[in-house]
Amino acid sequence: MTTTLLRWQRRLTGFTTRIGQASAWLALLLVLGMVLVVALRYGFGIGNIALQESLTYLHGSLFMLAIAYTLAEDEHVRVDVLYQRFSPRTKAWINLLGTLFLLLPMCAAIFWLSLDYVGSSWRQQEGSANGGLPFVYLLKSLLLVLPALLSIQALADGLRQLLVLLGTQVDQPSKHPEDHL
């Protein structure tokens, strides 16, 4: 049973990790786009609303797609005044209960509360009102993608904590992924 749980934990984490690593390229596009906007604006006096809005799209997409990866790498913000002193088993209990009773319900709430909002945007094929990009509905769709990806990683993290509680050796997230380059 533990090998099956471990296999699923690795698959789910691998999925969110690949999406997070792929979305990291959005940061490069965001920087290059910002340089282009500044160069056009101050170098040539050219303003482009669609180009400026694309930066908002990239910024939102980067955060919405990479949040599950941040959880997978255990790089999320944690106030650990007491947590750092706990045993691995106590930490596993805290993480498992937090995942089950806080993170997963929050993901469900975000998804549920966003359904009508995103659906309405899709029905209208909502675009920018001021001549920008015509794909606002795609950006709003990330409000459903975010809780879905975060839920997948929450399940993977819950499995990891359960395996720790069962006494199985589990790969812990790398604290500094850049060390593996």
Image: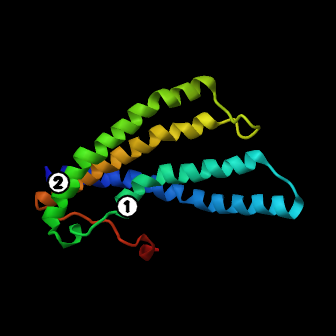
How crowded is the residue under tag 1: few (<14 C-alpha within 10 Å), some, or many (20+)? few
The type of residue carrying mark 1 is His
Q: Position of residue 67 (x, y in %)?
A: 43, 54
Q: Residue furthest top?
A: 123
Front position in the image: 26 or 46: 46
Secondary structure at numbered mark 1? loop
Q: Considering only vertical position in the picture, is 179 above or below 93?
A: below
Q: Position of residue 135 (x, y in %)?
A: 65, 36
Secondary structure at numbered mark 2? helix
Q: Is residue 48 visible?
A: yes
Q: Considering only vertical position in the picture, is 138 above or below 81?
A: above
Q: Which residue is painted at 48% across and 50% down in the image?
A: 65
Q: Residue furthest front?
A: 81
Label 2, label 1: how far apart the Cα atoms are: 20 Å
Q: Disc 2 marks which residue? A: 162
Q: Considering only vertical position in the picture, is 49 above or below 111?
A: below
Residue 98 lies left or right of residue 110; in this view the side is left
* Label disc, if present, on residue 68 of the rendered structure: none
Q: Quadrant of residue 28?
A: bottom right
The type of residue carrying mark 2 is Leu
Q: Disc 1 marks which residue? A: 76
